[in-house]
Amino acid sequence: MAKSPDPSEPSPNLLAKLPVLNRLKAVKDFMMGKLEKIEFKLNTIFENELKNDAQLLEAVTGLAEGLTRLTQAFERVHQKVDFLYSKKVNGLWDPSQPHKTQLITVDNTEPESRLMAYLYSFLPTRKAIDIGANVGAIAEKLLEAGFEVYAFEPFPQAFDQLKQRFDQHQQFHAFPLAVGAADENRDFHIAQDLSETKRYQDAAMFNSLTKHAMPEDMSFVDTISVTVRSLESLHQTNVLPADIGLLKIDTEGYDLEILRGMGQQRYPVVVAEFWDAQLPFGTSDAFNRLEDMVNEMQPKGYHWYLVIYRVWGDENVSFYCNYPKSIAKSWGNVFFFQDYDTFAHALKWCLSILDITYVA
């Protein structure tokens, strides 16, 4: 016997004619309705039929708990789809145009490098600066995307590894320099991992030009003198070309000083690391507060920004945009944009890959 069509179920033919975002919303609304009906029926069974059957009651209780978890998961989908759908009116998506999207999840622990690679196609030039390059983890991703990379690393041991790693790559240029607000010599503080399990893996990644606070199982144990150059100076002396498309900074608490040394230089995208004031690394002498960097960049014409963050002790990664304060105990990266269209491309990518935090 043929099944009668459910009038509440969206027609496959109708769905096929809708743009993908409308189609997703229609399916989402249908599924939310079905979950509500199932939940109502379970409640009815509880009240009318299971009072005297302990074994069946236990089984259905387990089913109800599973349904609750499913409903909670689908609610998160529900919120994201509604947010995406509402963005149509702001021009981020054209609902009249069909789209085909495929999402391949690889590793969600370092989405910043993948976003930088994604933005490659939307930048006016394909040249990038990597300040605080260490042994080249980010430089490698940028080179893979097609960027020509200018990398700066002042720690001799890390610089030697960096140089050896990419020495044969024609699109890679390495400089044994630190970058800051002005040309000078400064003490560079060397970090050591004191934890029994060596949880921080490569302690050299935590070396810094500022002697900021540290967790109990990490400490600065030595200093060396390094040469510091400002970005403005590096451009004026032709160490760096004028047509840079992306600037990435990761200097363990000194990022604000690099921004202050930009002078008249403007890059389409600037990526900097921030620490919340309650983070163990950021409780003192850290020059990378999110609010300070936003205040530094807005007068320079960077009116749009995305904040990708984690909370200390939690591996989940989320993002928000255009809010200048950090979440308590959070750390991550802020992407600054001079051009709205590039910001819009980055926002679409984040909405597809990451959980969004709504700041109320």
Image: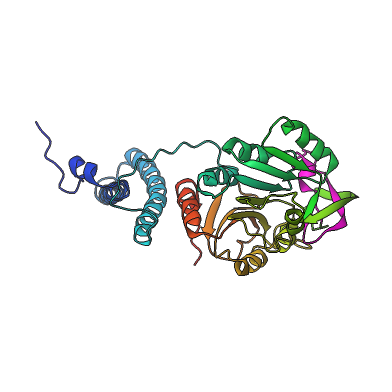
* Camera-side residue of 51 and 132: 132
> Could you say which quadrant of the image residue 140 lies in?
top right
Rendered residue at 68%/39% (across/down): 137
Rendered residue at 39%/45% (across/down): 70
The colour scheme used here is: rainbow
Rendered residue at 36%/59% (across/down): 86
Left or right placement of residue 322 versus residue 3 in this view:
right
* Camera-side residue of 353 and 295: 295
Magenta part of the protein: which range?
180-209
Can you give x and y, in whole percent of width and height, for residue 313 in the image?
65, 50
Rendered residue at 76%/44% (across/down): 205
The quadrant the N terminus occupies is: top left
Whether the magenta-drawn stretch holds residue 196 is answered as yes
Q: Quick check: can you spot residue 102?
A: yes
Can you give x and y, in whole percent of width and height, for residue 338 in the image?
55, 60
Can you give x and y, in whole percent of width and height, for residue 4 in the image?
11, 39
Can you give x and y, in whole percent of width and height, for residue 125 in the image?
57, 48
Q: Quick check: can you spot residue 51?
A: no
Left or right placement of residue 277 versus residue 186 in this view:
left
Whether the magenta-drawn stretch holds residue 325 is answered as no
Q: Please, is residue 151 above or below residue 82 in the view?
A: above
Left or right placement of residue 203 versus residue 342 in this view:
right
* Camera-side residue of 47 and 227: 227
Q: Residue furthest left?
A: 1
Q: How many marks?
A: 0
Left or right placement of residue 170 versus residue 22 in this view:
right
Q: Please, is residue 103 above or below residue 280 in the view?
A: above
